[in-house]
Image: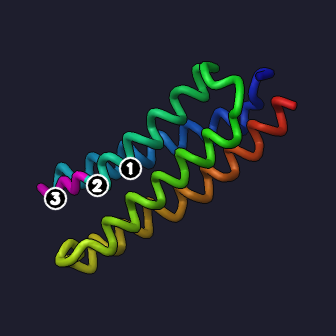
Amino acid sequence: MQERSNVSKWIGIVIILIQLLDIIIHVVLNRPEPTRIVSNIVILGWIIIVLAGWLKEKFRPISFGAIGVYIVLNLVFILTPNILTTSELLFMLFVFVIPTVGLSAWFTLRASKSAG
């Protein structure tokens, strides 16, 4: 895969920061939701692998797979009974998940265009 543009790298960095901030907020609020944290780790791992240049073949399917796992885990989080006990948790879910999905899709499309 060719060198990614600076924009793609910055998108990746922003995604990493969003995931780390999401984890930190959960821990600081003493509400570490395992399903959400695992979803954060999936996206963090995928972005780090891509930015390190380790994902050269089948970039798009693997990337959309990682995004899909992230979405599924967050849907599990939403649909688990009694998990959303406060409106703050629901707000945090939308503040972190929607930008992550959007930026991840944009990152995937930009990076795959620069590769080919």
User: Identity of the amino acid at label 1?
Assistant: Ser
Which region is colored magenta? Answer: 30-34
Q: Which mark is residue 31?
A: 3
Residue 74 x, y percent position in the rendering: 39, 62
Q: Are marks 2 and 1 in contact (CB under 8 Å)?
A: yes
Residue 107 placed where, x, y %?
67, 44
In the rendered view of the protein, which quadrant contains the N terminus?
Answer: top right
Binning the other alpha carbons within 10 Å of mark 1 as few (below 14), some (14 to 19) or many (20 upward) gives many
State left or right for residue 65 relative to residue 6: left
Which amino acid is tagged 3? Arg
Q: Which residue: 47% across, 40% down?
A: 16
The structure's colour scheme is: rainbow
Q: Is 73 on the left or on the right of 14, as rendered?
A: left
The C terminus - image quarter: top right
Magenta-highlighted stretch: main secondary structure? loop
Helix, strand or loop at mark 2? helix
Q: Is residue 90 above or below residue 27?
A: below
The residue carrying mark 1 is: 39
Residue drawn at x 17%, y 77% as measured from the top left: 82
Residue at image point 34% right, 52% down: 22
Q: Is residue 10 above or below residue 75?
A: above
As shown in the figure, which amino acid type bears the numbered disc 2?
Answer: Thr
Secondary structure of residue under mark 1: helix
User: Disc 2 to disc 1, how far (Cα)?
Assistant: 6 Å
The label nearer to you, 3 versus 1, is 1
Q: Is 42 one of the magenta-colored residues?
A: no
49, above or below 65, in the image: above
User: Residue 76: which quarter of the image?
Assistant: bottom left
Check disc 2 and report the residue beneath it: 35
Magenta-drawn stretch contains 31: yes
- Disc 3 + disc 1, Cβ < 8 Å: no
> Residue 63 location, x and y as percent?
62, 42
